Image: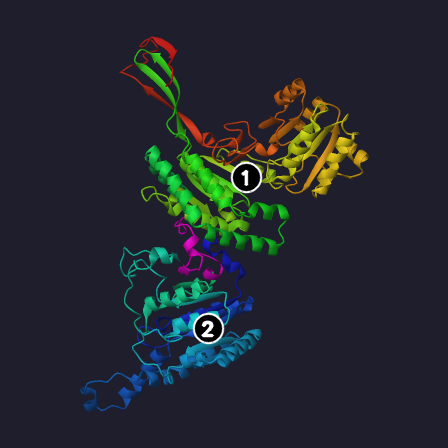
Amino acid sequence: MIMDPTRTFVKNVKRVVFKVGTAVVTRADGRLAVGRLGAIFEELEALNSAGYEIVLVTSGAVGAGRQKLKYRKLVNSSFADLQKPQVELDGKACAAVGQNGLMALYDNLFSQLDITSSQLLVTDNDFKIQDFRTQLRETVNTLLAFRSIPIFNENDAISSRKAPYEDSSGIFWDNDSLAALLALELHADLLVLLSDVDGLYSGPPSDPHSKLIHTYIKEKHQGVITFGDKSRVGRGGMHAKVKAALYAAESGTPVVITSGFTASNIAEVMEGHRIGTLFHRDSHMWTSLTDASARDMAVSAREAARRLQTLSSEERRQTLLDIADALEEKESLIARENQADVDAACHAGYDEALIARLLLKPGKISALANSIRTLANMEDPIGHVLDKTELAEGLTLEKISRPLGVLLIIFESRPDALVQISSLAIRSGNGLLLKGGKEAKRSNAILHKVITEALPSSVGEGLIGLVTLREDIPDLLQLDDVIDIVIPRGSNSLVSQIKNSTKIPVLGHADGICHVFVDKSANVNMARQIVSDSKLDYPAACNAMETLLVHKELSTTDDFQELIHELKQEGVTLFGGPKACALLDIEETHTFHHEYSCRSCTIEIVDDVHAAIEHINQHGSGHTECIVAEDPEVAECFLRQVDSAAVFHNASTRFCDGARFGLGAEVGISTSKVHARGPVGVEGLLTTQWVLRGSGQVVKGDAGVNYTHRKICIE
């Protein structure tokens, strides 16, 4: 079984609080369920041996004691006594009797497994004393250090609280809420509530139409879940568990409610499998498809895309405008989540280039919103008649633009890419699956949530699926019957790996090894500005200059030395080819095919424009190249012969961008020569469809029509 995408946090879990309910501890006849408890304790022993810190909270004392006292009462009653109305046994007396037997059984079972257990009885009033809380933590930490398992229970025998227990104004009001309180008090990484059902259902578990809810999302499920009857022997049933789970989860401790009747459930929860119902503080930011497989997610995107395509052009335009407004409205929340990602990346020691790509600088959200509005106000790209031909009289053929279908985009640390790609997919009528880098997890989650919530209900949030696990990628790459194109935005190795792993067409954006060649005819002041902007405007961008080529006749001039000095003054680390090293006394580069993505670049001296072209075609990545020259013949030679997606004359390489090209946004920059090349905007996400309109014609061995093949002017 594969780890569920929403449960990857279990890999970092060490301290776990387990709570066993009365229905788990006792049998239907009220006796202790020795076999069931033994199986559970074996699971806990395995976790204890594996290094987990286990705390156990147990119910069942009242139930076990009631069984004993009923028997004792029966033995000591006369026939006449039994004919009288029977008074309910005092719960506190039952607890006093049952606790003794319960702990005797627990101690015996754990002893058989060579585990030392310890009993801690607490009351609600105890937690009102700060010294008690401090002593409690110290005692538990000491016990856990000895691999002992502390067993907690509310001391019902002396508790001053009385039924009804619906009053939850106390610090805790049952053993579920006690378990939640202890999980927070003891800084547990996970709380597992073991019940007599598999988890939380959309209705009573006995109802065949009820479905198990794998991830509880408060905004989605609160107020619409119908709880069944309370526990047959406990106080609150599932309602109490949900209340306790929400309290713990919202305070930072994830909770899983699952069945204690299947002992293996414990191991599967700890392995991150989709067992029971998960409560997590961040669940509101997860896609509504958390319970879906890779295929389910892809199919949902395809179906939603088809619904999107039925909307009018104005409705799709309004959807984009709504998304732009929503992003600006949630800007502070987005900034907070993004800063959390940046702080985590800094703490983890990620390099400067990645952190630069990760950060959403002030004003970035507004800029993204405005680019979406620009895209919304562009001409609708869907349904354009691109070509029209009269095949024969009364037989007309049209070539029309249509959406590709479902796009799978795999990108790295830039969360702004999620916004651009999503808006392009919506404008072009495509479904979308997104897999961002783990370093931008929180940023991607909140951006995805804001965007999908702004989608029309008639389309559905499934239009844009957010893939959260890298392990899901291989499954998605096998879905060539559902996914129409894969666009990886990352390293050459990533692109190559994906191309070798799928039958789905791949639109490759590999390295961004961009060159600027300064010809001997260049205006030197212009050259300095272009070189500086190409390298320093945004060093982490894929369209930043990585190699500077200089004509040999300029290399010995003062102007060249001044250019080198300016780069060094700006903190640029220079590496040289063989000729530049000898001239400038700088470290030699280990390869010309290198993308720095930071304040570093390679310099080499070339004999002329032909040598520059040869160098670029041999060592470049086919992204963006620039020539700075005043000689028009030299410039035209460069523009014609350089084999890259974008070639510029006297302009910074940083102009190679979908928004700057007027495309509204870009899904990436393709270095491929098939389908789309360079910045890929809306047009790169479209395909074509042939539409033939006739009036009853048949081929009849090509004798049935008189072909004219006359081109028709498109209005």
| Residue 278 placement (x, y as % from top left) | 41, 60
**Which residue is labeled 1 in the image?**
489
> In screen coordinates, is 577 left or right of 702?
right
> In screen coordinates, is 670 left or right of 124?
right
Mark 2: secondary structure: strand
| Residue under the point 35% across and 71% down | 23
Corner quadrant of residue 613: top right
| Residue 526 placement (x, y as % from top left) | 67, 29
> In screen coordinates, is 140 left or right of 373?
right
10 Å neighbourhood of mark 2: few (<14), some, or many (≥20)?
Answer: many
The reply to whether residue 4 is in sight is no
The reply to whether residue 335 is in sight is yes
Q: Give the range drawn in magenta.
A: 268-292
**Which residue is labeled 2 in the image?**
56
**What amino acid type should be assigned to the residue bearing mark 1?**
Arg
**What amino acid type should be assigned to the residue bearing mark 2?**
Leu
Which quarter of the rendered picture does the C terminus lie within? top left
> In screen coordinates, is 211 left or right of 420?
left
10 Å neighbourhood of mark 1: few (<14), some, or many (≥20)?
Answer: many
Colour scheme of the picture = rainbow
Report the Cα–Cα distance between label 2 and label 1: 47 Å
| Residue 24 placement (x, y as % from top left) | 37, 71
Q: Main secondary structure of the magenta part?
A: loop
Corner quadrant of residue 172: bottom left
| Residue under the point 61% across and 39% down | 537
Mark 1: secondary structure: strand
Corner quadrant of residue 237: bottom left
Circle 2 or circle 1, nearest the eye = 1
| Residue 466 placement (x, y as % from top left) | 45, 46
The vertical placement of 659 against 51, above or below, is above
